[in-house]
Image (tube, rainbow, N blue to C red):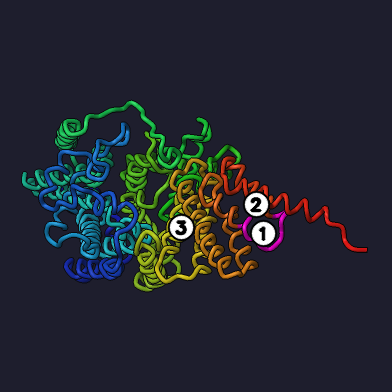
Amino acid sequence: MKVISKSSAFNKSASLGNSGPRNWIFILLLAIFSIVLYFNTYYNDYCLDDTMVITENKITQKGFAGIKEHLTNDFLFGFRNRKSEKNASFWRPLPLVSFSIEIGVWGKNKPGYSHLVNVFIYSLVVILLYLLLSKFIFKNKWLSFFSALLFAAHPIHSEVVANIKSRDELLCTFFILSSFFMVGMYIYNRRRINLFLSLFCFFMALLSKESAITFLVGLPLFLYFFFELKKKDLFKISAYFLGITFLYIFIRNSVIPFDFSEEVTQEYLILNHPFLYANAQESFFTKIFVLIKYIKILFIPYPLCYDYSYNQIPYVNSSEPWLWISILVNGFLLFYALKKFRKKSLISFCILLYFLTIFTVSNLLFETAVIFAERFLFTPSVFFCTAIVFLLNWAHLQLSKDWRLKGLVFTIIIFIPIFILFSMVIINRNRDWENTDTLNLADISKSPNSARVNDGVGNYYINASQRKNISLREKDSLLQLTIVYYARSIELYPDYKNSLFNIGIANNILSNEYLLKGRDAMENKKLNSSEMYLLKAVKYANYDDSAFVNAWFNLGEVYYLGGKYHLCLQALEKVLSVQPNDIFAQKGYNECKLLLQNSKSIKPSP
């Protein structure tokens, strides 16, 4: 079989030519570049959802002994210790098995090794992209090299590589590219082993992440665009992959039966169901609007943020200009791809595969737990980077007719600044992923309207306030920040249970700390200092908490000792409003009232 004539014609006119170093040199350079970009993730800890799949997953923590259980349970069974809710069950055993193997080999709490595994798989994805492009698509080593290099350097991938949990994305893309490459090799040499390996890799991709099923359509498109196949051969090869898909569905349904009935959990409703509060029109318009946001961040991957949940991306209505820009841009791209479909244009292929891979996470077909996520662009960016290099080469060919701009000079002018800038963004972003706290602190300025990020920052400050050997002033400052971020989280999402609970904890800590300080000052006859501390104690005390009663009672005692009987009465009234049968408060109230009456009845001397 041979590559389609359109691609062959393109190769002959390719500005960088097809000469140059051998494949192994390009492969080595790509591997080194990919590893260098992400090597500093080795020093990072576990972060975000790593707890669910590794550190707090009882099955993963068993090491080799947990492999069988991962194969026979849903994705988060080891974390929840129960079957997942309806419409929320995933079966992605392969990444979980890889985590169990790592624990079996290296032991527990070795995040650095897991990060290096992610980096290694990422470098393999980059190399496979180069091989696929150079062998079957561009058939030009230089253009394939720069496409793979652009993919390797794109900052949008930092979440997938730096977050261990995103192993599912890495493995899925690795096996999909492997499947494409091996089926291409099968068409070239007709060795059945290559077809078998291609089918095996496709099955492994499905075991890594369910979204791989979209390539049941993507693979026939690949064969149609880049190989001269008879229709019956195209259908025959596609039928093999359809058979593997049915096998996967059968096994998956045996492990976790499909259940399409809807069950919405009460905990974190809007965080797991982003369109819960939107009407039908707002829901549809927001989903269309998000499509242009994906394109924007592919071109300008800055700033990067791990969370775009409620209410960072507000619901969109028809008056939003970017909605109409999204409709025009995406509509034009789809129109162009369909128009050039019969001509087997490379750009048409890239656009169709981009839409195919982004469609499953766009919420248009079925709603996911998130409205937008950078990790969702990992596979679509393969086709984005390929198209960009193709278009840049085309632009150079046009410019060289008039300006005689050499390919190497053009490459230096365009690519070198991009690679330097992108590399700086990635290396700095990797540091943000050091742990959950550093990530939340880095992203709060980028996602200030996210209830989840505000809650995460609140968690950081409340934990920081509990460090040993910290002064009351420092604790006060940290807990003040805690309250600010939890309050913002609750303002965005009034039912956020974690924020509601912890803001009470923060207030309680402050109240008790100032209560103790106030008592100490009172015992040392420092009434002014005691009053100041106790006023802060009552400020932070919850109405139905014991600290509220104790703070007001002690404040009443301070006022009594200072002769401020009218303030003493007010303080004890607060106590009796909560505990009307408090004997000591009643006794103090009566004594104070009597003293106040006597002081008013004494007339001054003439």
| Nearer to us in this view, 526 or 280 | 526
Q: Is residue 139 left or right of residue 398?
A: left
Residue 264 is inside the magenta segment: no
The secondary structure that dominates the magenta segment is helix
Q: Which residue is mark 2?
A: 571
Residue 315 horizontal/vertical position (percent): 53, 40
| Nearer to us in this view, 490 or 225 | 490
Residue 215: which disc? none
Q: Which residue is mark 1?
A: 559
Residue 556 is inside the magenta segment: yes
Q: Amino acid at mark 3?
A: Val
Bin the neighbour count of mark 2 within 10 Å (Cα to Cα): few under 14, some 14-19, many 20 and up: many
Q: Is residue 372 left or right of residue 116?
A: right
Rounded to the nearest angstrom, the CA distance separating label 2 from label 3 is 35 Å
Label 2: element kind: helix
Residue 118 horizontal/vertical position (percent): 24, 59
Q: Are marks 2 and 1 in contact (CB under 8 Å)?
A: yes
| Nearer to us in this view, 542 or 293 | 542
- Residue 479: tell me if it is visible: yes
- Image height of 60 relative to 43, above or below: above
Q: Which residue is mark 3?
A: 457
Q: Is residue 296 left or right of residue 249?
A: right
- Image height of 99 relative to 426, above or below: above
Rounded to the nearest angstrom, the CA distance separating label 2 from label 1 is 9 Å
The structure residue drawn at horizontal position 52% and vertical position 42%, both measured from the top left corner, is: 494
The structure residue drawn at horizontal position 19% and vertical position 50%, both measured from the top left corner, is: 60
Q: What segment is highlighted magenta in the picture? A: 555-567
